[in-house]
Image (cartoon, rainbow, N blue to C red):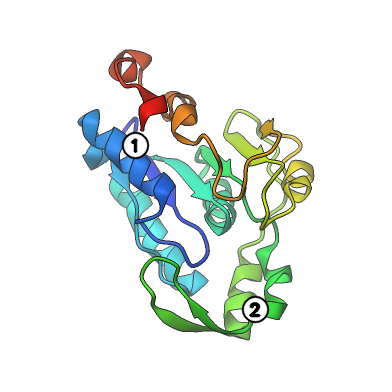
């Protein structure tokens, strides 16, 4: 489906996250909710990738929108399938950061408790790809105030891609709703379809 979007949430997140909720609301108002998938990802990377592969098969050639760890998944899948990807404060080499996090985790939205093991870390490492080189297929949205990830790691890794770096902000990405027209346009949705929406009011 042209104009379709696969939203990929981050670590210990869920479809109830603010960005996913706002995007779902907009696609609903556009009459395009059938063109959106926001899967509740399994905490294990191998199962999460399986879910995302299924969503890609359903949507055809969607724009992959990945936040944080979802940005890492999106990069892997975009390189595997030649898809476009829009990454929001994406994680780079997350397996290198997880050593101190092994043990019990809790999903921020569902309260589900689960164990982060070495197998999770190994599975994440298996998904690493060389830095993307096609600037037409990528947009990378970074905010320098990200308190969880150092934006400079993504700035370096995605340096061949179209970078949009904003001063300030945070890991959740402040001002996300106002930036949605750029996302919709990148997904191939015409401006005439969304120009009546007041994104600043979302």
Crowd band around label 1 with a 10 angstrom C-alpha radius: few (<14), some (14–19), many (20+): many
Residue at 78 percent across and 46 percent down: it is 152
Residue at 54 percent across and 57 percent down: it is 73
Q: Viewed as shown, does residue 162 lie left or right of 65?
A: right
Q: Viewed as shown, does residue 180 lie left or right of 128?
A: left
Q: Nearer the viewer, residue 132 or 12?
A: 12
Q: Which of 200 and 124 is in front in this view?
A: 200
Q: In this view, does 101 lie above or below 33?
A: below
Question: Mark 1 falls on what kind of element?
Answer: loop
Q: Quadrant of the C terminus?
A: top left
| Image quarter of residue 68 | bottom right
Cα–Cα gap, marks 1 and 2: 34 Å
Q: In this view, does 106 lie above or below 156?
A: below
Q: Nearer the viewer, residue 8 or 83?
A: 8
Q: Name the residue under label 2.
A: 101
Asked whether disc 1 touches disc 2, contact meaning CB atoms under 8 Å apart, the reply is no
The spot of residue 62 in percent (x, y) is 39, 40
Q: Nearer the viewer, mark 1 or mark 2?
A: 2
Residue at 43 percent across and 82 percent down: it is 113
| Image quarter of residue 197 | top left
Q: Is residue 86 above or below residue 94?
A: above
- Disc number placed over residue 135 in the picture, else none: none
The spot of residue 130 in percent (x, y) is 72, 52
Crowd band around label 2 with a 10 angstrom C-alpha radius: few (<14), some (14–19), many (20+): few
Residue 167: tell me if it is visible.
Answer: yes
Residue 60: tell me if it is visible.
Answer: no
Q: Mark 1 points at which residue?
A: 4
The spot of residue 43 in percent (x, y) is 46, 73
The spot of residue 86 in percent (x, y) is 53, 39
Question: Mark 2 falls on what kind of element?
Answer: helix
Q: Which of marks 1 and 2 is nearer the N terminus?
A: 1
């Amino acid at each position: 489906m042209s104009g379709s979007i696969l939203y990929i949430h981050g670590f210990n997140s869920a479809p109830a996250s603010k960005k996913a909720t706002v995007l779902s609301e907009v696609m609903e108002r556009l009459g395009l909710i059938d063109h959106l998938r926001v899967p509740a990802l399994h905490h294990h990377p191998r199962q999460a990738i399986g879910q995302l592969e299924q969503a890609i098969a359903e949507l055809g050639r969607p724009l992959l929108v990945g936040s944080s760890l979802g940005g890492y998944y999106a990069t892997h899948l975009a390189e595997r399938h030649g898809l476009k990807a829009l990454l929001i404060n994406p994680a780079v080499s997350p397996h290198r950061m997880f050593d101190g996090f092994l043990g019990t985790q809790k999903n921020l939205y569902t309260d589900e408790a689960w164990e982060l093991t070495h197998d999770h870390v190994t599975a994440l490492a298996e998904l690493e790809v060389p830095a993307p080189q096609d600037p037409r297929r990528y947009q990378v949205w970074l905010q320098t105030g990200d308190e969880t990830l150092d934006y400079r790691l993504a700035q370096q890794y995605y340096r061949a891609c179209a970078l949009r770096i904003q001063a300030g902000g945070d890991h959740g990405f402040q001002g996300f709703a106002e930036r949605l027209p750029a996302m919709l346009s990148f997904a191939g949705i015409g401006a005439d379809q969304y120009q009546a929406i007041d994104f600043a009011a979302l």
